[in-house]
Amino acid sequence: MNRIRLLETLKKNYVCKSFYPLLVSFLLILTFSIWSNPSLKPHISGDGYGYWSIAEDFTIKEASIRPFLFPLILKVIINFSPDNWQFYFTLFQLISHSLISSFLFLIYKKCSFSDFSAFICTLAIGFNPNLIYYSSCLLADILLAILTTISWFFLFYINSREEWNKNLMYLLSFFCGLCIVTKPVALLMIFPIFLSMIIVKNISIEFLKILPLFIIINFSFHIIWETYKNQHHEEKTIVKSDLIFGAINWTAIKSGLIEKGRNTPLYNILLERNQIERAKKLKTVFSYTMDENPEFLVVFRSLHDNWAIKSDNEFAKKVFKDSPLEILFFSAMKWHSFFTKRGYSPPYGSFPKMPRIVKIIYVKLYAYLYRPFLLFLLIGSVVLLLSTTNKNLLYSSFFIILYASAVVNFASASASEFARYRVWIEYIMWFCAFYPIGFFLTFLQKYRKTLDILKLNE
């Protein structure tokens, strides 16, 4: 019976009817992604080497701050092919990117888009240079993005049904749990998900019965990993709260509040390095892009050899206790730039033999889509979804987007980090951004068909 129901569900959700567009979009996105990095060698940064080290030994100090899922996947791939693991890792991530991008076609179809408009919007997301670039990076960001998007898929289908589907609910909690053990920023993502469910479907007895096991599954992986760390990592080089302290410290410094942290380790080392007077002159200036003040960067880079002091908890506690509203206000000032920062362009060597003019158009097109159009497209999407009473897509998507942008904003010392950390919700974000375009294309097609019918009737 369950198999019959599953087949009926697949038919209802256009999986069978949409097989060929799905397959074509997957193959096109995968081919284009491989073309971006034909050697299939991952881009490895400092964080990448950190993940690599953990994959080789889960008991090292660095594992105390990083969750286990991405290093575990990396370890499996390394053990599968010790000599060619970098090739297989990059191929795995590019295939994952292509699959998740192509499956967005189904959600567009669920929103009553035409095949053509759904296909165009799907390719536009799959060809995104920022997503393709991070799919070739030895980082956990694209894995988190994929798991979050899968969670969003389940949330969308749960909210689109009148009844509460237990199996879908438990699958949603399972993938949300995997998000937490990919990067800790997803720890509280369950709350915007609950909020969207409550608004779209309302609370019922059936929901309350499912809730306890849902919560247990969601946090189980995290609890198991934390228990393991407590047993194997007695000495921790850094704790999660250090990330918050670091964000508070540098928000205070770039806003000219350096004197609020007098006689703390961070203040004293800046004094030793003759940076206090420069820091006193700093102030946060509101702008569309919130680019960093060059003088602030001088202060920040003066501590390049002492990263630990940047998270000085004494400075953070002293400043926040004295000026909590100012810290929150100055942090919030850069929130909008989460949606205005441009993504990464294809690195040197990408897309060999692509005509130069084509590459310039490709890079420029997405650069302008990120800025200035992304923010306006998202606002247009909200207005359109409200006007068409599509509560499901509106709340399922934008609560997750707002949660992610808020967490990244308040936990980041600098808006310059947004281009990377925003990858987390870029599949969902660009799905919503392209929604007005796809809606308009579908409208034009329907309008044209109507005119053709009228002409035939004449």
Image: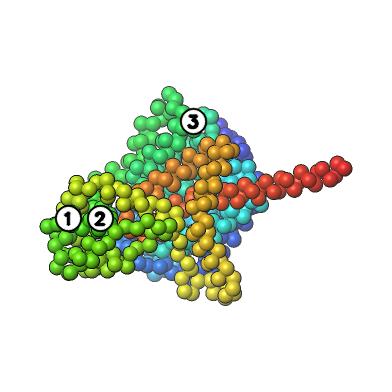
Q: Position of residue 256 (x, y in %)?
A: 25, 58
Within 10 angstroms of label 3, few (less than 14), some, or many (20 or more) residues? Answer: some
Q: Amino acid at mark 3?
A: Lys
Q: Position of residue 91 (x, y in %)?
A: 47, 63
Name the image quarter holding the C terminus: top right
Considering the numbered disc 3 on the image, is that residue within a helix, a strand or a loop? helix
Tell which circle, 3 or 2, labels the residue nearer the N-terminal end: 3
Q: Nearer the viewer, mark 3 or mark 1?
A: 1
The circle on residue 201 is 3
The circle on residue 424 is none
Within 10 angstroms of label 2, few (less than 14), some, or many (20 or more) residues? Answer: many
Q: Which residue is mark 1?
A: 261
Q: Which residue is mark 2?
A: 252
Q: Amino acid at mark 1?
A: Gly
Q: Position of residue 407 (x, y in %)?
A: 35, 48
Is there CB contact under 8 Å for labels 1 and 2? yes
Considering the numbered disc 1 on the image, is that residue within a helix, a strand or a loop? helix
Tell which circle, 3 or 1, labels the residue nearer the N-terminal end: 3
Looking at the image, which residue sits at the far left?
263
Task: Please indicate whether residue 117 sits to the left or right of residue 98 in the image.
Answer: right
Q: Nearer the viewer, mark 3 or mark 2?
A: 2
For the residue pair 439 and 268, the one nearer the viewer reads as 268
Considering the numbered disc 2 on the image, is that residue within a helix, a strand or a loop? helix
Task: Please indicate whether residue 400 sits to the left or right of residue 45 in the image.
Answer: right
Is there CB contact under 8 Å for labels 3 and 1? no
Q: CA distance from mark 1 to mark 2?
A: 9 Å
For the residue pair 386 and 289, the one nearer the viewer reads as 289
Is residue 435 shown above or below 363? above
- What residue is drawn where x is 49% and y is 33%? 200
Within 10 angstroms of label 1, few (less than 14), some, or many (20 or more) residues? Answer: many
